[in-house]
Amino acid sequence: GDASGAPGTGDFCVQAWVRSPDSEPTGGTYFHLWSQGTTGTGGQASGTGFVLKCLKNSGGLNWYPYSGDNNNQGIDHSLCTQKYGTWAHIAVGRDGGVWKLYINGELRDTGITDSDDKSDVYVTMGLGLSNTNEHFNPSPKLALVRFNTGFMPTVEMFKKIYRDELPL
């Protein structure tokens, strides 16, 4: 895989601590934790970009990756729910060509093989550039956002991160 500033076709991971709103937000439907795309469109509409986003519902925030080719990468977001009013460690990335999504150190779902070139390097965190009218209010709070290319941490590493950082 690539070990440059953009994931290209290699493994990568985006992870963050996210504090969800206390109750179901109003307004739009989505929140973009990470949008990697072009300067004009963000990751949602860029063929070599991607977005890590959540969909609000009555029970919490449903997390999933979404690529610029209008595909949720096979992640079932109903399996990846963060309850309202909680902090959670969210980690999403590609490992050996397979999308993986972790919440609090637990693998929640895997997605389809994805060999797309994710080479766009313009990054926004928190909202994103495309479809900003779809964002809900209030937005989740973010802490300790991390991005790495060239590898996806193991489940043991995610569990350790969760255990070590939870008291913070």
Image (spheres, rainbow, N blue to C red):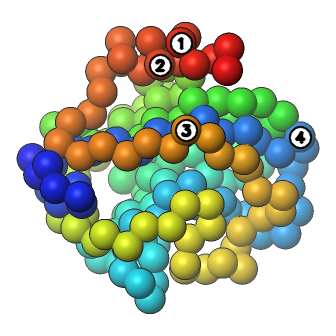
Q: Which residue corresponds to the image point at 73% horizontal and 64% vertical from the top-left?
A: 29
Q: Which residue corresponds to the image point at 44% horizontal and 52% vertical from the top-left?
A: 65
Q: Residue type at mark 2: give it.
A: Ile
Secondary structure under the numbered disc 4 in the rendered image? loop
Q: Nearer the viewer, mark 4 or mark 2?
A: 2
Residue matched to label 2 = 161
Question: In the rendered image, which quarter is residue 60 located in?
Answer: top right
Disc 4 or 2, which lies upstream in sequence? 4
Residue matched to label 3 = 144
Disc 4 or 1, which lies upstream in sequence? 4
Q: Residue type at mark 1: give it.
A: Asp
Q: Residue type at mark 4: give it.
A: Asp
Q: Which of 49 and 99 is in front in this view?
A: 49
Residue matched to label 1 = 164
**Marks 4/2: CA–CA distance:** 24 Å
Disc 4 or 3, which lies upstream in sequence? 4
Residue 4 screen position, x and y as percent: 16, 56
Cβ atoms at labels 1 and 2 below 8 Å apart: yes
Residue 104 visible from this viewpoint: yes
